[in-house]
Amino acid sequence: MATIDGFLLSGRSDSLGHADHGAAVAYRLRKPCQLSRSDEINGWIVESAEGKSTIVARSLQALDRRATIAAGTESIQRYLDLLSYEQSKVSELADLGDDHVLLYTNAGRRIVEIMATEDMVLGVSMAAVAYDRDGNLMPPPPEPSAVWTPALRFYRLSQASSDLYEAYRNLWLGLEVLLSTVGAKGSNEGERKWLRRVLGEVAARIDMRALLPDSRNLVDYMLLDQYERMRCYLFHAKPEDGMEAPTLPDPEALAVAYAQLIRIWRHIAQCLIGVRQGAVGVVTYEGFRAMLFSPFSSGLGVVYSDARTPPSKNETQINPCGAARIELDNTHYQDGAMPGRISVSASLLIEQRQSVPELWRFGCEIGREKILFCVGMIEGGLCLSGIDQLDILQVFRLKNASSPKVSF
């Protein structure tokens, strides 16, 4: 059976009598858990252990990837709610929407997926000077005066948050203040109608296409992807008649939505309200793509090892000290799906092997020399017994040194 950090993920049943679980999700907590406990939440078994940062939920249902993330994450959130109320033990999930380990079912096959996101912090330092016609250094022009708007209070609260859901709520509240400055909501105007009108005014005044996925229309994107799929789920706490209690949005989708929304937010604040932009030395999305294309085009592979050595910055091999090195197949490089995000994925068919080593370290290699480009680690190790396939999804996210926080 597949396990992570000593917790059962499952997979196919074994001789020890473990049941065949078709769905599981594992996250890390911000701090090690303060007690050992196991609860059944909506048909999911959720487990934590004192002193460990891993938390796991598993189900006997054979669920696909999206359903596993949605139902498993919600079960873990409810488990943590109960711990907070019953035991006064408050825990938060770390890197929600960025990192996870999944077990899900696709066409009857059990697949384990590791998703990891690495922020690539880049910056450009530059200075400009001006001389007059006689060659004398001219004093720099005065900076524009500070422009404050009430929306900045919500922006600061959003950036100060350690919780992705809370950060998004505050950022959206700030957006509503910004949009109210552009065009106030009429007394008899519904919210959706007002948003459509005022976002149309924004789109008419500034070009937002470079900030939107696939250069989509601003109004359609904001109403569908942000308002309906994210904002409404996070702000509507009362279930309607005949509905189940509302659940939080998929964290993976919410993390992407937050990163998109904050870029749109800042562009509106700068162009239409006059808020100073601050530092401007940035690496563009195209520059980021070009920077990674060069090393990745020289040869790219995804590997893992059972080496238990914690990763360090100067390592060049996935398997120090002669540990096992397993190379995955079908490496796929994708860019352009979302601005500032590039992903590398690969898979390993385990059903064709009698056994495989435990997975502790994983990463990407480049070039003929197979130099280690990045490396991550699974705390406590990942045993891959009882499954059919391993997938690794490594996401590289551009983070300019002067850019706002987008991971929580």
Image (cartoon, rainbow, N blue to C red):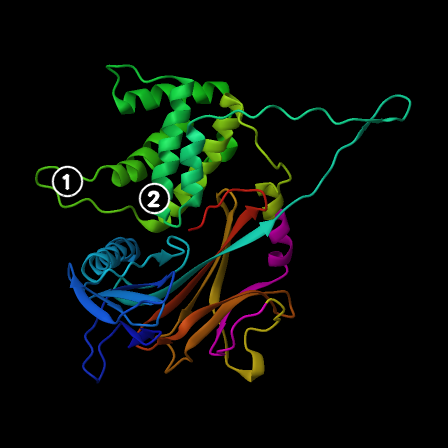
Residue density around tag 2, few if under 14, some if 14–19, many if 20 or more, within 10 Å: some
Of the pair 319 and 378, the residue shown nearer to us = 378
Q: How many marks?
A: 2
Residue range highlighted in magenta = 290-312
Per the image, is 388 magenta? no
Q: Is any part of residue 217 visible from this angle?
A: no
Q: Secondary structure at mark 1?
A: loop
- Quadrant in the picture for the N terminus: bottom left
Reading the image, the residue beneath label 1 is 239
Q: Residue furthest top?
A: 187
Q: Is 400 positioned to the left or the right of 239 in the image?
A: right
Q: Is 43 positioned to the left or the right of 396 in the image?
A: left
Q: Earlier in the sequence, mark 2 or mark 1?
A: 2
Amino acid at dot 1: Pro
Q: Is any part of residue 212 visible from this angle?
A: yes
Residue 11: give x, y in percent of width and height: 26, 72
Q: CA–CA distance between discs 2 and 1?
A: 20 Å
Q: Are marks 2 and 1 in contact (CB under 8 Å)?
A: no
Residue density around tag 1, few if under 14, some if 14–19, many if 20 or more, within 10 Å: few
- On residue 127, the disc is none
Q: Is 242 positioned to the left or the right of 303 in the image?
A: left
Residue 312: give x, y in percent of width and height: 57, 69
Amino acid at dot 2: Glu
Q: Nearer the viewer, mark 2 or mark 1?
A: 2
Reading the image, the residue beneath label 2 is 166
Residue 323: give x, y in percent of width and height: 52, 82
Q: Residue furthest front?
A: 88
Q: Residue at x 13, y 45 (%)?
A: 244
| Residue 205 drawn above or below residue 70 | above
Residue 219: give x, y in percent of width and height: 38, 26
